[in-house]
Amino acid sequence: MPRASRGRMGVHLVAAVAGCLVGLVGGGFRWCLARAAELRGSLVEASEQLGALGPLVPAVLTATGAAVACAIALRVPLSAGSGIQDVEAVWRGERSPRPPWLLPAKFFGGLIAIGSGLVLGREGPTVHMGAAIGAEAGRRTRMDESDIRLLHTSLAGAGLAVAFTAPLGGVLFVCEEVTRTVRARLVLVTLIGTATAVGCSRLVVGDRLDFRVPELPVPPLALLPAFLLFGAATGVLGAAYNRLIIGLLDLCDHVTRVGPVARAAAIGAVVGLLLGVDPELAGGGDRLSGRLLGGDIPVVPVLVGYLAVRFLAGPLSYAARTPGGLFAPLLAVGALWGVLVHALAQPLVPGGAAGAVPFAIVGMAALFASVVRAPVTGIVLVVEMTGATSLLIPLMTACFAATLTADRMGSTPIYDSLRLRTVWPG
């Protein structure tokens, strides 16, 4: 067998084995987060028996978690935030993959930050941990720099797939968002790494869909203009969300009199107070999204409150500079937005032909598309998480409009913005 062919087969084998480790680590991370959420819920429930002092318990809990997670991030450069922008920078050759101690920093820092109640997503740490595992596997097997970079990028996609149990979404994420190219070798390495990662993660977290959604009929063609307009409006919302994320990061950078750990604790205290008011106002948002997608729709004033608070709390939590991602809170905001728009526009919907759940699902994908600017990845992720294949045409229509609107407004894709504002350490 020619040497080049042996090298290609070697990369595939390393990706498959490393993918198993990504699946076990990512699955373990998800399992730990679920147990942390249960513990957090029990503490908040117990604090209600303390009377006037009760709201202080979740405030102290989240403040402490934010401070500890921020301290961990300060000790390990680039472990703060999502990490997806770091993966993109490595692929572009702007910097080299981080050493392997990024892995425990992301795992424990993300577990503490998200578990304490900050409005952050599990996918950022899982993507970054997957990338770190891929790069270290390449180093250990003495791959050259290009193959190490390939494994770093491919296993990052496996990490996203594990975070949402969305294998195709992980592959598309690598091609559409990280590399913005489709090459046979890149796709094949990502496919095998993602397949083994998701397979192994199912040993830990099971193989059911992330959200249980009732069977949905195919919406009538008469509703496509409504989904087109909804997508355009979502594009405006996504552009505003991006600006809020960057604006709060810039604001925190200018508050130099307060140290980063103290600033994280203050942000955590604010989020913790929200947690004490209503658990659905804090945390990653999976439980809230599950309620909405299951048809448990609150009244309009409550929807408005949830949307307003979570729209602000996600970017604010990200500004704490702890490990944690943007996707999961973004999906919850998109679901709230879709349900709210349906409730307000229901008299205008032809014959009431679509319920709130289709708009929630389409809202999740459309907001993702407008913020990240990866519409196909958003569509596939949401379909894999919900099983809502009957909504493919509305999803495509709304994501087209959302992406086009955000582009026309001059909104920079969020991970481009985050990558460009990062000062990379040597």
Image (cartoon, grey):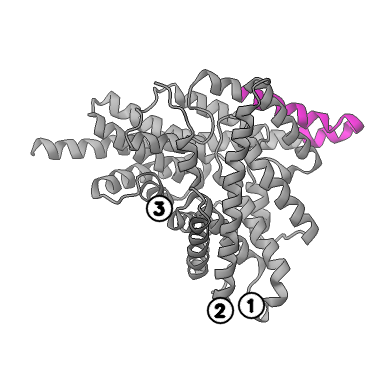
Kind of residue at badge 1:
Ala
Q: Give the residue at mark 3.
A: 168
Give whichever of 145, 192 is nearer the camera.
Answer: 145
Q: Give the range drawn in magenta.
A: 43-69
299 vs 122: above or below: below
Q: Mark 3 and mark 2 in contact (Cβ < 8 Å)? A: no
| CA distance separating discs 2 and 1 | 7 Å
Report if residue 299 is visible in the image: no
Q: Mark 1 and mark 2 in contact (Cβ < 8 Å)? A: yes
Give the residue at x 54% y 59%.
Answer: 366
Residue 175, x across and y down, in percent: 35, 49
Residue 263, x across and y down, in percent: 67, 25
132 vs 2: above or below: above
User: Could you tell whether 317 is left or right of 127 in the image?
Assistant: right
Based on the picture, tell me whether residue 372 belongs to the magenta stretch.
Answer: no
Pick out the residue farthest to the right: 51
Give the residue at x 66% y 40%.
Answer: 283
Give whichever of 401, 45 is nearer the camera.
Answer: 401
Looking at marks 2 and 3 on the same chain, the residue that comes earlier in the sequence is marked by 3
Q: Give the residue at mark 2.
A: 220
Pick out the residue farthest to the left: 2
Magenta region's main secondary structure? helix
Looking at marks 2 and 1 on the same chain, the residue that comes earlier in the sequence is marked by 2
Indicate the secondary structure of the residue bearing disc 1: loop
Name the quarter where the C terminus is drawn: top left
Q: Give the residue at mark 1.
A: 353
Give whichever of 362, 319 is nearer the camera.
Answer: 319
